[in-house]
Image (cartoon, grey):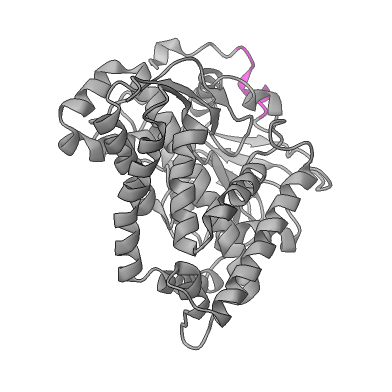
Amino acid sequence: MAIAELPEVQTPVDEIDLSDFVLWSQPDAMREAVFRKLRTEKPVSFHPEPEFGNIPAGPGYWALTTYDDVTFASRHPDLFCSGQGSNIGDMPTEIAELFGSMINMDSPKHTKLRLLVNKGFTPRMVARIEDYVHDVAREIVRDIKPKGEVDFVTEVAAPMPLRIICDMMGIPRSDNEFVFDKTNHILGGLDEEYNSSVEDIFNAGWALWEYAQALGTERLANPQDDITTSLMQADVDGARLTAAEFGSFFVLLVVAGNETTRNAIAHGLLELSRNPDQRAALLADPETVMPTAVEEIVRWATPVIHFRRTATEDVELPSGNGTIKAGEKVVLFYGSANRDERFWDDPYRFDVRRTPNEHVGFGGGGPHFCLGANLARREIRVMFEELFRELPDIEVSGEPAMLQSNFIHGIKHLTATFTAR
């Protein structure tokens, strides 16, 4: 997408409402154009909060749209905390803890939980996961090879991280579909394909939490060689995860580990199909280009659109874009930061050789940087290596069916064709 191809936004900048769901049902190009207008004319703007089910509208929020402001807020948790919520609306405490786990915490609680979680990912377990990524990718490609046409999301991009996360946690393959269905509901927002009400989202989260509690309790009684067992037995200065803490972390892990990677993989094939010169560059020298291509895929996709923080005191943004008052909400729009013309050269060009590439696709740094970033990078790389090795002519045919969401930059369905083998 060249910058000249973005449509002109007719709405005056002061009338742009980032809480208007109609905006998030627009094509990507229109969304990009709206954020370009905000970055140019009003890089920090105030927006009303929408009602969300039975959760009443809050006082509103400041939208941070530039790279400098997003990274500053991310890297200063003393000034912009997460403990008051990472969603725009103020959810009840039990709901926030159920869905958010450590992303809705500040130190020292966040530090304690992160140390406990890290204990579960032992070097032996991580090494086994890295080897297993190849096995899962080969299995998926082997299954689709005879078909010639697939829904790339449901048959390739989604099963890859789902199987790895479930196998890591010791979840039986027979329960994978249950986990997949619940994660789709949780991050499906009010997209009609997944949910008819906010209650559907909460019910899916509760079902996953209960499943995790039962799994964790069972592993305490009957240890296995899996990360669930390691997490339930982890000890830091005499502290262990409670069953409730494990349940909340489980919801975070399977949702984040499934949705974000699957959407990066889906967006990756879409852009490589739309940009044959970039695809050719990758295939000509995959050993050299694949690492930078993976980073560009994540920058371009930016699967998580935003997270919220709350100012702990009056903060003058060093960018000069304004002052945030203590107690006010700020929402960090990662996709906008990843297109900021002040930071990026030619940000609307998909470039598999782009370097440096200090994107915020895994967060803007700081204590809440994505725990699974390295695993996600490996999954994306290995999936494309296996695809292009076995199905070198695979490409997207037709337009993607996009998720209608202001939180996840998702692709629901994507038809891909190739020579059947």
Tell me if residue 46 is in the magenta stretch.
no
Residue 251's place in the image compared with 357, above or below, is: below
Q: Which residues are magenta?
A: 10-17
Q: Residue at x 52, y 72 (%)?
A: 113
Specify the principal SS of the magenta part. loop
Q: Is residue 147 left or right of residue 251?
A: left
* Residue displayed at 57% across by 23% down: 401
Which quarter of the figure is the N terminus placed in? Answer: top left
Tell which of 107 and 192 is nearer to you. Answer: 192
Of all residues, the one furthest to the bottom in this rendering is 238
For the C terminus, give its image quadrant. top left
Residue 320 image point, x, y percent: 47, 40
Percent coordinates x, y for residue 40 in the rendering: 48, 24
- Which residue is depicted at the point 53% across and 59% down? 172
User: Of residues 176 and 186, which is closer to you in this image?
Assistant: 176
| Residue 11 painted magenta | yes
For the residue pair 349 and 330, the one nearer the viewer reads as 349
Q: Position of residue 2 (x, y in %)?
A: 38, 15
The answer to whether residue 204 is left or right of residue 349 is right
Q: Is residue 252 visible?
A: yes
Is residue 58 in view? no
Q: Position of residue 242 (x, y in %)?
A: 61, 77
Query: Where on the picture, by quarter, is residue 372?
Result: bottom left
